[in-house]
Image (cartoon, rainbow, N blue to C red):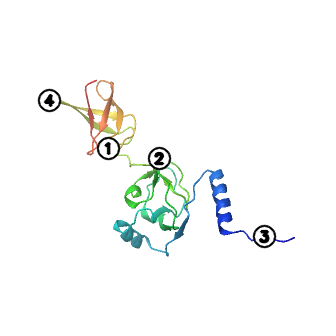
């Protein structure tokens, strides 16, 4: 029996098919030299060329976990390869974000798999503001869902028990509008 050598492209094609069947998309890349997190942070800050250098997890990142640069590794894409659309691969897209689902090592990170950190947690007491012209009404409410700045969430007025929808502001307060 004669064993036929597998060509690199046939091997890569087989690996891609297996990875896609398994539900993930591998990042075909060449790892950069072993770099510490500090070197990585310094290089990532301004030295990326579009489509050549990307960040992928170097370990499993679990849902609800904050993504830190130490959990990522910098890789250089093989010439001719481009990152797929809707994938987060730059430090500013990933640093401090929260994983919505499990992120596997060596795989691209879908933009839909990360979110901003919550500014207000569910069940937290918050100040609610209603502003109309020169009139400002303030009340205390309890959040019924978590939210980041700009998110529309539901809150329950502590005094009346009425449920209101409002926008989370950058300072952690909620602004409601007339409905």
Q: Nearer the viewer, residue 16 or 44?
A: 16
Question: If you read the primary sequence from the N terminus, does the residue marked by circle 4 or circle 1 appear first?
Answer: 4
- Position in image of residue 5 (x %, y %): 75, 71
Residue ID for mark 2: 112
Residue ID for mark 1: 149
Q: Nearer the viewer, mark 2 or mark 4?
A: 2
Q: Which mark is residue 133?
A: 4
The crowd level at tag 3 (other Cα within 10 Å; few <14, some 14-19, many 20+) is: few
- Looking at the image, the residue that sits furthest to the right is 1
Confirm or deny contact between disc 2 and disc 3 (CB under 8 A): no
Q: Nearer the viewer, mark 2 or mark 3?
A: 3
- Looking at the image, the residue that sits furthest to the bottom is 33
Query: Compared to 84, does 37 lie above or below?
Result: below
Quadrant (top left/top right/bottom left/bottom right) for the N terminus: bottom right
Label 2 – label 1 distance at C-alpha = 18 Å
Question: Which residue is rendered at x = 84% and y = 71% of the image?
Answer: 2
């Amino acid at each position: 029996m004669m064993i036929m050598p597998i060509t690199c492209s046939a091997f890569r094609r087989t690996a891609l098919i297996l990875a896609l069947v398994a539900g993930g998309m591998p990042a075909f890349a060449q790892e950069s030299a072993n770099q510490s997190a500090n070197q990585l942070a310094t290089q990532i800050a301004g030295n990326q060329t579009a489509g050549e250098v990307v960040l992928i997890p170097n370990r499993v990142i679990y849902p609800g976990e904050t993504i830190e640069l130490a959990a990522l590794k910098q890789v250089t894409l093989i010439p001719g390869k481009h990152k797929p659309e809707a994938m987060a691969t730059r430090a500013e897209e990933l640093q401090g974000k929260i994983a919505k689902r499990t992120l596997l090592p060596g795989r691209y990170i879908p933009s839909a798999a990360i979110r901003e950190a919550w500014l207000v947690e569910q069940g937290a007491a918050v100040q609610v503001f209603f502003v109309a012209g020169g009139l400002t009404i303030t009340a205390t409410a309890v959040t019924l869902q978590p939210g980041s700045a700009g998110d529309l969430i539901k809150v329950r007025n502590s005094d009346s028990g009425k449920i209101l929808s409002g926008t989370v502001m950058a300072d952690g307060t909620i602004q409601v509008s007339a409905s």
